[in-house]
Image (tube, rainbow, N blue to C red):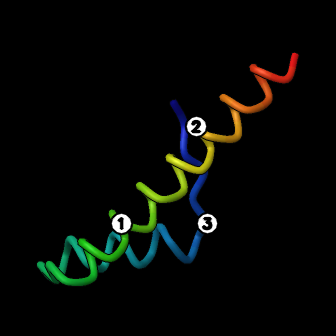
């Protein structure tokens, strides 16, 4: 599974790791998990519609 991230998200993620900002890192992970779940649901729906 691949997750495309924007340049801004990459910068935020890198800054959170370098600054040891746990809150920002957790917020990014939550955002990424939501996106992956949405992609999975969209893929499941299109597969069932075929």
At 85% from the left edge and 23% from the top edge, which residue is drawn?
49
Tell me the CA gap for discs 1 and 2: 15 Å
Could you say which quadrant of the image residue 13 lies in? bottom left
Tell me the number on the disc at residue 6.
3
Vertical placement of residue 33 versus 42, above or below: below
Q: Report the residue marked by disc 2.
A: 40
At 50% from the left edge and 72% from the top edge, which residue is drawn?
9
- Residue positioned most to the right: 50
Vertical placement of residue 3 versus 35, above or below: above
Q: Are marks 1 and 2 in contact (CB under 8 Å)?
A: no
Q: Report the residue marked by disc 1.
A: 30
In the picture, the quarter occupied by the C terminus is: top right
Which one is closest to the eye, mark 3 or mark 2? 2
At 61% from the left edge and 66% from the top edge, which residue is drawn?
6
Q: Are marks 3 and 1 in contact (CB under 8 Å)?
A: no
- Marks 3 and 1, the one that precedes in the sequence: 3
For mark 3, does the 10 Å Cα neighbourhood hold few (<14), some (14 to 19), or many (20 or more) residues? few
Residue 41 point in image, percent of width and height: 62, 40
Secondary structure under tag 2 reads helix
Vertical placement of residue 26 versus 41, above or below: below
At 33% from the left edge and 70% from the top edge, which residue is drawn?
14
Residue 35 point in image, percent of width and height: 54, 56
Is residue 12 toward the left or the right of residue 21 in the image?
A: right
Vertical placement of residue 41 versus 47, above or below: below
- Marks 3 and 2, the one that precedes in the sequence: 3
Tell me the number on the disc at residue 19.
none
For mark 2, does the 10 Å Cα neighbourhood hold few (<14), some (14 to 19), or many (20 or more) residues? few
Is residue 22 toward the left or the right of residue 3 in the image?
A: left
Which one is closest to the eye, mark 3 or mark 1? 1
């Amino acid at each position: 599974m691949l997750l495309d991230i924007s340049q801004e998200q990459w910068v935020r993620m890198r800054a959170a790791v370098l600054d040891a900002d746990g809150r920002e890192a957790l917020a990014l992970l939550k955002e990424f998990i939501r996106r992956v779940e949405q992609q999975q649901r969209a893929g499941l729906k299109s597969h069932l519609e075929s």
